[in-house]
Amino acid sequence: MQFRCTISNVSGQAWRVADEVAIGWQVYDPDTGAFLYEGEWTRLARDVAPGESAELSMNLALPAADGPYRVYVSPIGPRTGWLYAHGEEFLIVDAEVAGGETRILRSERTTLARMRRARLLPALRQILVAPFRELWEHAGLIQSMTRREVLARYRGSLGDTAWTVLHPLLLMATYFFVFGVVLESRFGNDSSKTGFALYFLAGMLPWLAFSEPLARAPQLIVEHRNFVKKLVFPVAILPVNVTIAGGVTSLFATGIFLIALLIVRGSIPWTAVLLPALFLPQLFITAGLCWFLAALGVYLRDLTQVMTFLLTLWFFLTPICYPETSLPVSLIPVLSQNPMFQIVRGYRLLLLEGDLPALAMLAKLWALSAVVFLSGHAWFARLRRTFADVV
């Protein structure tokens, strides 16, 4: 295809024929950005001073296969090579080959920096919108699978769905016996076992909804490999299902805790109604981490064992079974960067002390939850293209 264009020297240095300055072109795949091949160079017919323009004619030989193609047309310096790679302007030509005929769709002068900026906005929009759109489109399926997830855990057992309540209750009772009765741990000025039980259980409530989904996430995709290989299935909802299922378990435990609090203290602080301000960012953080772990677990099969250790370590680095005051003062600024540290503290303030968490802490928690949620989904979306090749 014969192609004519006007080139302008805006480099500040003269383009001289003696220096063998040329104009070249390269062909790229517009969808993936993959380089395909490089065409012949065309030498300048005359010197072009800074600010001057020159007419140029060249033959663009596009592939015979039908499809869209993108051509970069750029000057080539004798020592610097392709000038567009050094930030100089170049010409983009979008063309289409169909039935052996070539048609130019558009041409534009640009730079690599402008192209990156132009791609940034759609990419950011995709990152911000994609997870919420996916959740909205598959809300019914998520609800159905989450319900099945919760009920299937104990189906066929004597307790059946009652285990949804009994499991967190027995788990918390076990921890209470170890730390409250055997080790005689206490919180603050309250030396009673009842006081310890309330503070300990208030710290366990968010941990239940956090640790259970993270422990399951690394093996989710491998467990549902048939969904990946044989069906057109939105696998991104699998980490969401376990996150919501963990949240449901925590809600049952919270209901039991509030009843116990009413019996022991005779009242529930009004600040308990603000619990969603902590519960929602906690779910967002959990979902983001589950997306990350579920995608990584496809390639690292030992991740389940690693997470078992990390969650145990994470539990004991969070002041759940001991008061914050028992930590070395020098470590508190470091350990308090742990989001679960702040969430546990917030639960105790709202449920037991009738006080409000600091607004700055809440703002940081919500900001962190947004970052973890969006980046976790972006990570999962990037890797899921290759899941079928691995599982």
Image (cartoon, helix red, strand yellow):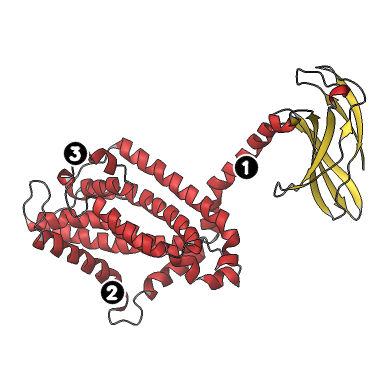
Q: CA distance from mark 3 to mark 1?
A: 46 Å
Mark 2 or mark 3, which is nearer to you?
A: 3
Q: Please give the name of the residue rendered at 38% of the width and 60% of the height, measured from the top-left corner.
A: 214
| Foreground pick, 247 / 311 | 311
Which residue in the protein does label 2 denote?
162
> What SS does tag 2 mark?
helix
Q: Position of residue 317 (x, y in %)?
A: 25, 50
Q: What numbered label is drawn on residue 329?
A: 3
261 sits left or right of 68 in the view: left
Question: Residue 137 falls in which quadrant of the image?
Answer: bottom right
**Quadrant (top left, top right, bottom left, bottom right) of the N terminus:** top right
Mark 1 or mark 2, which is nearer to you?
A: 1
Q: CA distance from mark 2 to mark 3?
A: 43 Å
Q: CA distance from mark 1 to mark 2?
A: 48 Å
Mark 3 or mark 1, which is nearer to you?
A: 3
Query: Is the C-beta separation of discs 2 and 3 under 8 Å?
Result: no
Question: Residue 74 falls in which quadrant of the image?
Answer: top right
330 sits left or right of 27 in the view: left
Q: Is residue 215 visible from the viewing direction of this image?
A: no
Q: Callout 1: 10 Å neighbours few (<14), some, many (20+)?
A: few
297 sits left or right of 80 in the view: left
> What SS does tag 1 mark?
helix
Three-letter amino acid code at the position of disc 1? Pro
| Foreground pick, 176 / 136 | 176
Three-letter amino acid code at the position of disc 2? Ala
Query: Is the C-beta separation of discs 1 and 2 under 8 Å?
Result: no
Which residue in the protein does label 1 denote?
122
Three-letter amino acid code at the position of disc 3? Val
Q: Position of residue 286 (x, y in %)?
A: 39, 54
Q: Sequence order check: which comes first, mark 3 or mark 1?
A: 1
